[in-house]
Image (spheres, coloured by chain):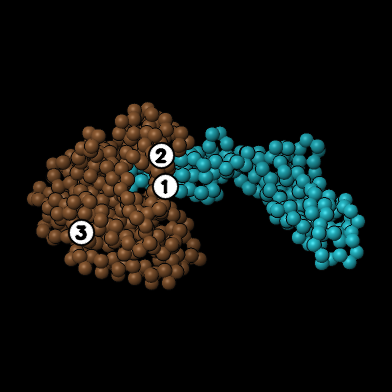
Chain colours: A brown, B cyan
């Protein structure tokens, strides 16, 4: 990116930045009233996210241990879970997070994540709390409804994402996207259809909460068996006006299972010819010590502020997005 | 030519797609909450002028297209080809065929400067200057005194284009025309 000194000015107006500050104060008041503790955890860590579809930024630094590689966190999740295991009780954070390559109207490689954890909360209880928070910032958000991942695909594409043969998924995804999906796996095809066909229709007349994702997309969520007998991830995503706002889990607390998923992620990364990421062994140790069962959610606060203020891009609610930083 | 990956796609980048050179208009990064990222890309096919919308897996790449826009002066036509000359003092000439000239044929004026798009050193498209001064070669006689009233009539210009002009315009007058809209601007 060539940087020109002519764009020294912020991309958000000063008035927007004032409104942003008011909305962030409202978020803090929301959690203070519910006795959720605000915490600050490091932006740099010895481990990064192994998620095959997240690219972490890393840097070399001189630390007490000498010259080391540190990772810019893609979310504050691992550090916050260590606090939970240490007995923090419910916590929230407004954390700067970094994701390499995520650039566009709804992305900036550096952004603010609102992440919170509720020990003892069911997924349903956390969904209710998410809704309440969204309504605090956007009172006119409209009614909320639960949408099952499977139903969305059936309605929009007449396709069952759990049982359709891979060849069928590849054909439909390839047709919709206008590209060759023959070497893509099930999740690759489903991701494409979700992004291109389903997402734009979500949250258009209210808050849509998508639940029961395929187990292969569980990330750090527990899995369970749904009424059709298929294994699903205990996970939800919240959409408003076609924008994905939040991603919540019934949190995995099993250290062994967590370690296995990290390894599996790194195998997938290697297959995608992406660099293998240092696994967070301290998180595994914290889970082995014992993290209380409960639910947690990460919400892209820049997007929520964008919608609350009726702006067209996250850049319009940030002082200096990456092209201007 | 170099290859460009989806994260290098931006407006104005020229790439090869399905064998044709294309100009990238827009590149939108799309990604479900957790999962694989894609790029929704709008490109203009520089041969046909059509706009394509294509999806790419993030990280995929396309070969760059050797496409250049150059200023050239229009010289003459021999009936089959239209001949242009670079304005950089090299006197280098390029012949443009009917397909590449397209609609611009009716906006050609000797010695005016056009943008000629070259692909692998062949002319594939020509765009006229935004404004051209052209003589009226045929129109109904002008109506005296009628300078303020609305109303218009067709006039054929020296380049061959037919435009709507005010009623007071006479044959032989030179007019300033906006080539983008094909509209009369003023007397030159």
- Quadrant containing the N terminus of chain A is bottom left
Please tell me whether residue A73 is drawn above or below residue A18 in the rendered image: above
Q: Position of residue B141 (x, y in %)?
A: 91, 56
Separation (CA) of disc 2 from disc 1: 9 Å
Separation (CA) of disc 1 from disc 3: 48 Å
Kind of element beneath mark 2: helix
Q: Name the foreground residue: A96 vs B32.
A: B32
Q: Position of residue B149 (x, y in %)?
A: 82, 65
Q: Residue A63, labelled with which disc?
A: 3
For label 1, the residue is A201
The residue positioned farthest toward the front in the image shown? A143
Q: Name the foreground residue: A161 vs B125.
A: A161
Q: Residue at x 72, y 43 (%)?
A: B103
Q: Position of residue B133 (x, y in %)?
A: 79, 56
Decide: marks 2, 3 in contact (CB < 8 A)? no
Few, some or many C-alpha atoms within 10 Å of disc 2 (few <14, some 14-19, many ≥20)?
few
Q: Name the foreground residue: B154 vs B16.
A: B154
């Amino acid at each position: 990116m060539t940087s020109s000194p002519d764009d020294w000015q912020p991309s958000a107006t000063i008035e927007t930045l004032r409104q942003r500050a008011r909305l962030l104060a409202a978020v803090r008041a929301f959690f203070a009233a519910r006795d959720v503790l605000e915490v600050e955890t490091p932006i740099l860590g010895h481990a990064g996210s192994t998620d095959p579809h997240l690219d972490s930024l890393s840097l070399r630094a001189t630390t007490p241990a000498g010259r080391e590689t540190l990772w810019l966190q893609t979310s504050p999740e691992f550090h916050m879970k260590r606090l939970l295991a240490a007995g923090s009780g419910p916590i929230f954070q407004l954390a700067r997070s970094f994701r390499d390559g995520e650039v566009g109207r709804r992305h900036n490689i550096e952004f603010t994540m609102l992440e919170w954890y509720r020990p003892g909360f069911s997924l349903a209880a956390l969904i209710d709390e998410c809704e309440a928070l969204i309504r605090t910032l956007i009172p006119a958000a409209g009614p909320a409804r639960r949408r099952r991942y499977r139903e969305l695909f059936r309605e929009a594409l007449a396709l069952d994402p759990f049982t359709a043969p891979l060849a069928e998924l590849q054909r439909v995804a390839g047709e919709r996207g206008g590209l060759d999906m023959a070497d893509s796996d099930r999740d690759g095809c489903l991701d494409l259809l979700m992004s291109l066909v389903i997402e734009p229709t979500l949250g258009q007349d209210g808050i849509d909460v998508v639940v029961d994702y395929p187990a292969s997309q569980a990330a750090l969520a527990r899995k369970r068996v749904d009424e059709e007998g298929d294994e699903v991830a205990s996970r939800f995503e919240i959409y408003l006006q076609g924008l994905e706002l939040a991603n919540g889990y019934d949190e995995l607390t099993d250290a062994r299972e967590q370690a296995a998923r990290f390894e599996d992620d790194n195998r997938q990364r290697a297959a995608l010819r992406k660099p293998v990421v240092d696994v967070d062994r301290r998180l595994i140790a914290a889970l082995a010590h014992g993290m209380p069962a409960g639910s947690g959610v990460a919400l892209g606060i820049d997007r929520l502020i964008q919608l609350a203020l009726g702006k067209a891009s996250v850049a319009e609610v940030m002082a200096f997005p990456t092209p201007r930083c | 030519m170099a290859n460009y990956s989806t994260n290098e796609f931006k407006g104005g980048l020229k790439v090869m797609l399905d064998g044709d050179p294309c100009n990238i208009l827009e590149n939108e990064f799309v990604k479900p909450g957790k999962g694989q990222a894609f790029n929704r890309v709008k490109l203009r096919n520089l041969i046909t002028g059509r706009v394509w919308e294509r999806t790419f897996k993030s990280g995929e790449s396309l070969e760059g297209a050797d496409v250049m826009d150059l200023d050239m002066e229009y010289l003459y036509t021999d009936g089959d080809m239209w001949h242009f000359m670079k304005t950089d003092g090299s006197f280098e000439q390029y012949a443009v065929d009917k397909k590449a000239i397209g609609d611009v044929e009716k906006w050609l004026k000797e010695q005016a400067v056009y943008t000629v798009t070259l692909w692998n050193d062949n002319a594939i498209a020509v765009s006229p200057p935004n404004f051209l001064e052209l003589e009226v070669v045929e129109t109904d006689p002008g109506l005296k005194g009628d300078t303020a009233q609305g109303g218009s009539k067709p006039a054929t210009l020296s380049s061959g284009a037919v435009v709507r002009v005010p009623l007071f315009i006479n044959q032989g007058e030179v007019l300033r025309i906006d080539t983008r809209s094909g509209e009369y601007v003023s007397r030159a």
